[in-house]
Image: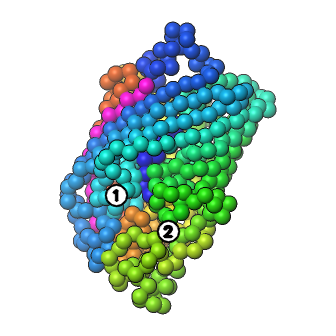
Amino acid sequence: MLFTVVPVQAQTEPDPRATDAFDFMNVLAKKGWHDLKDERWNAYGQFTYISSWKGASPALYTNLNGSPNSLLPGSERSFSGTATLYLGLKTWDGGEIYYAPDMISTRPLSDLKGLGGAIHNFELQKGGSEVPVYFTSRLFFKQTWGFGGDRIQLDSDPMQLGTTVDSRRLVVRVGKFSVIDFFDKNSYSGDLRRQFFNMGFMTYAAYDFAADAKGYTWGLVGEYFHDNWAIRFGHTAVPIDPNQLPIDSRIFTYYGQQVELEHKHLLNGQPGSVRVLAYRNHENMGKFNDAIAAFQSDPNRNATTCTGFNYGSGNAGAPDLCWGRKPNNKMGIGINLEQQVLGDIGLFFRGMYSDGKTEVYTYTSTDRSISLGALARGSRWGRKRDSMGIGFAAGWISREHARYLGMGGIDGFIGDGRIKRGPEHVVDIFYSLSLLSSLWVTADYQHITNPGFNADRGPVNIYGMRVHAEF
């Protein structure tokens, strides 16, 4: 798919950029026209523009034998521009409706091919257009039931009305949203409009969560909070074809499910969290070994002859996943850690293991992944609304996946025609400079090795600049 989906990041830790921030809701509150602690409605917005440049990189081969999914070795420029409006409305006690219209314009590197999990710009989407596209990213109903405990103030934010809730409560959401709006949250790695650029830091790269080609889905998410503990479950729709836009309405025939357990703690007086997530998808998808077996039994079942959904490979001597598609399961489990240290520095780690038997259906081509790093707030050097970070992410593919690619097969994003299997690594370093109360300019550098999990190609250096505004 690869898409523009930015999870709405609940602020579990203080955000220095919010200090003295100019936004519409704060202006109304200061004039006494709006109560930020007990909102009937709210409205927020954002604009983000990212420009990236890739230098020339070494490659022993590119798009070998008609396989079309290589990252081009020459220098390239890409960009993305997005704008979002977030609207919230209280319907009755505990009931809320949220709506978010979106606009996006993109030009990816190499038509968004050749990178496994280390996509350099999280905003990019498969099949994106330089002509602006308008769509609804979120439209859902939320109901909260309280069961006692302490009273907690939830701050006004995009997709969150300012209100007071019980520390023990059940929250149910039904409608259109992104799965990672609610699952796999992390204060220091996840809000990529403010933090890292690379998609390896948005969520687990190996988390093939249900979504359309823009990153959104329809379904239900339930969360139960019990003081410092939380458990959440989601059942969501999947696309009809992998990495495509139309959603399959048969949500009980083909679906994605995930369950997550979370615990918040204090370590030496500093807040932190531990989250464990497991997912299971049931989709009409191909297994790598089945595609290989079909090709070996009949070479006419190759990448050029399938009349069903395929990725358009011109390699007549290669297997294709379209010959192996049938109802299959895909599963994975991951752990997510965050810890504040020294008051203005945060550390994070994610790691996920997926089974690696089946094709990527909606996210990246990665079968196993880790990411870790640190984010520092500018208060440490006298600029409290600046931030900087350094992160390292790595992804791997399974033996079945590598064998399929080595025979010339492709998936939604990678396939050079041959492969020397290796882990795909990225180092991402950024500095975000606050220019005005709600405007940030960020410089970013990424070094990617073994692009597409192929040690015969790369490394690649990518330089980026981001302008982000909020209101």
Image quadrant in which the C terminus is located: top left
Q: Residue at x 34, y 57 (%)?
A: 112
Give the dominant element type of the magenta stretch: helix, strand or loop: strand
Indicate left or right for 8 with 302 as reference: right
Alpha carbon of mark 1 to alpha carbon of mark 2: how far? 17 Å
Q: Which residues are magenta?
A: 457-471
Q: Nearer the viewer, residue 247 or 337?
A: 247
Taking the magenta stretch, the answer to whether it contains residue 469 is yes
Image-quadrant location for residue 280: bottom right
Q: Residue at x 33, y 79 (%)?
A: 315
Residue 359: numbered disc: 2
**Residue 59 placement (x, y as % from top left):** 24, 67
Mark 2 Cα within 10 Å, few/some/many (few <14, many 20+)? many
Image-quadrant location for residue 416: bottom left
Image-quadrant location for residue 453: bottom left
277 is higher (above) or lower (below) than 196: below
Badge 1 or badge 2: first in the primary sequence: 1
Taking the magenta stretch, the answer to whether it contains residue 406 is no
Indicate left or right for 233 with 301 as reference: right
160 is higher (above) or lower (below) than 251: above
Q: Residue at x 20, y 59 (%)?
A: 74
**Disc 1 marks which amino acid?**
Leu
Q: Count of labels shown?
A: 2
Instruction: Name, please, the residue furthest toward the bottom.
Output: 297
167 is higher (above) or lower (below) than 213: above
**Residue 147 placement (x, y as % from top left):** 79, 32
Q: Nearer the viewer, residue 440 or 349?
A: 440
Q: Which residue is mark 1?
A: 112
* Observer able to see residue 184: no
